Image: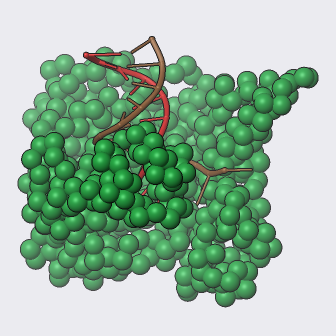
Chain colours: A green, B red, C brown
Amino acid sequence: MHIAVSAHTGGAALGADADGAVTLTELDEAGRLLGPPFTVSRDDFPQAVVQREKHSPRWVWDDTRRWYPVLLEAEVEVERCVDLRLCHTILRNAAATAESELARAAPSSWDAPSAWAEQGETDTLFDLGLQRGHDDEAQADPVEEFRLQRAAVAGSADPNRLSLLLAAESAGSLVAIEMQFAGLPWDASRHNELLVELLGERPPLGQRPARMHELLLEIRAALDDPAANPDSPVELVKSLRRAGIDVSSTNRWELARHEHPAIEPLLTYKKLSRLLTANGWNWIDTWVDGGRFRPVYVPGGVVTGRWAADGGGALQLPHQVRGAVIADPGWTFVVADAAQLEPRILTAMSGDRAMAAAGRDRDLYDGIVASGAVDTRAHAKVGMLGAMYGGTTGESGRMLPRLARAYPDAIRFVEEAARLGESGAVVSTHLGRTSPRPSGEWLELQDDARQEGASEVLRTRAKTARRSWGRFTRNFVVQGTAAEWALAWMAGLRRRLALLGPELPLRERPHLVFFLHDEIVVHTPVGLADAVAAEVRTAADEAGTILFGAVPVQFPVSVAIVDSYDKAKG
DNA sequence: ACGAATTGCGCC
DNA sequence: AGGGCGCAATTCGT
């Protein structure tokens, strides 16, 4: 029998056995049973959830993707939940819970990836969750797991932060399913127009669009090579070298360094080729259905805590096609992005007061210029990005000493994260998500390089690997904490949006339709757009306070009300 | 011939 | 010697 569970006052919950019956167990916050489990049929399950929702339970279940789509199909929304699998992953790896029973136990089905993720095809997603048994999960008792998780959090040095992280992660799992359910409004005919403007008419299978064909002829003429093939990197390098262009690869950066009549058409060709293959007509055929693009979001899909997406390249939608994202008649979009999120996160984490002042009531990079640390906004930006990514070369590297002088706390913070990574240690985000340990291979390499008589080659390799891991941990703390801020922002906004349309189903009131790391899109009736914009800002302020308390760091968002996505300055 | 790895590039 | 991804096409390796 599968048991999903709900906890908290008034809560109840569920699980499905082979016949699809669902068992609900009422729990308190520690996971203690408040009464005997009871069973409802699969058909009655959504209604049972509706009854319980009146008391705002927190549903505790193994996997939001398993349960929530069925509920949304039945127009049942859940206010909050615990996604045990996502939370387990966090607690299993967190330094703060390393001594817990949960973390010391042998790996179990809770450590496996979601068994419900792969069935994300649009035709099956929303009806099979309850019916399909899963062998591993048959053994996995969510009540017991919930208790282990609560105990692990309670036993950690800072239970509040971890609790917050688990709540945010779980809220994100609800948003992910809701956004897939609602879909991103997508106008396929507008998308086609955009493609025709850039590429020419859709060509027959296997042929190049007209514009690309013209460019191909230009390239061949310029290279004096009638067989030059820009689609093949290997052949293209040979063609370029024959024409006297000294390249070792065909990537854009390297090509752009050379002056030659073939370069410009080649770069244009590659740009269009990318558009055609990644977001061309085939993409429309595959991913747009009924005026909606429904990517499968994968909360926690990135080690840092960022989301990933499965199918359609949802998190890489090029600006070229964003004009096809058009609001329904009578509706509009509220598009918001957090301004300079990562450096502001670093400011709050490191307590750098000078940087906090630089970012107060203005663009942070402008503020850095105004402080006299660097001379242009572009320098400020590239310098800060370099500091957070571990860049050492070029402009970025040159800016670092100035930034370190002006903002010692912030720079020291990321340098320390890098140093820890290089030494093989783990680092953690503000709320306690911990970086993975370096691989056995990495550790061995470091070990071997330290041996007496290790070759110079080996020592160099070890150093390269060490630096590389340091760049990863350096970035992990910032990117991961930014992801936490974004989750808090989105969770708060989700709650606030629900209040703008009480009693209305998700798709008939303002709802989130897109999320991109530090940017959100809300689809809303036109009349509520201003109210939504206000909630977006309030939720952003709240997210900063929730994570960091009363620190003097602002998290401003730029908000645009637009009827198509390309009109938001991105 | 086929799956794995690489290349290149889109997003943040 | 720049962090994290996903995806399509090409190229490599067996």
Can residue A515 be seen at all in this image of the molecule?
no
Seen at 51% across and 31% down, the residue is: A148
Height in image: A355 above or below A466?
below
Height in image: A24 above or below A170?
above
x and y, in percent, of residue A352 in the image = 72, 71
Seen at 20% across and 43% down, the residue is: A69
Can residue A478 be seen at all in this image of the molecule?
yes
Left or right: A266 in relation to A192: right
Height in image: A341 above or below A359?
above
Residue at the far right: name it: A452
x and y, in percent, of residue B2 in the image = 29, 18
Query: In the rendered image, which quarter contains the N terminus of chain A?
Result: top left
Seen at 43% across and 39% down, the residue is: A234
x and y, in percent, of residue A39 in the image = 20, 29
x and y, in percent, of residue A447 in the image = 79, 25
Left or right: C8 in relation to A384: left
Q: Nearer the viewer, residue A140 or A261?
A: A261
Residue at the far front: name it: A224
Seen at 66% across and 81% down, the residue is: A368
Height in image: A303 above or below A453?
below
Left or right: A314 in relation to A404: left
Quarter holding residue A479: bottom right
Disc tally is 0
Query: In the rendered image, which quarter contains the C terminus of chain A?
Result: bottom left
Quarter holding residue A290: bottom left
Q: Which of A73 and A389 is in front in this view?
A: A389
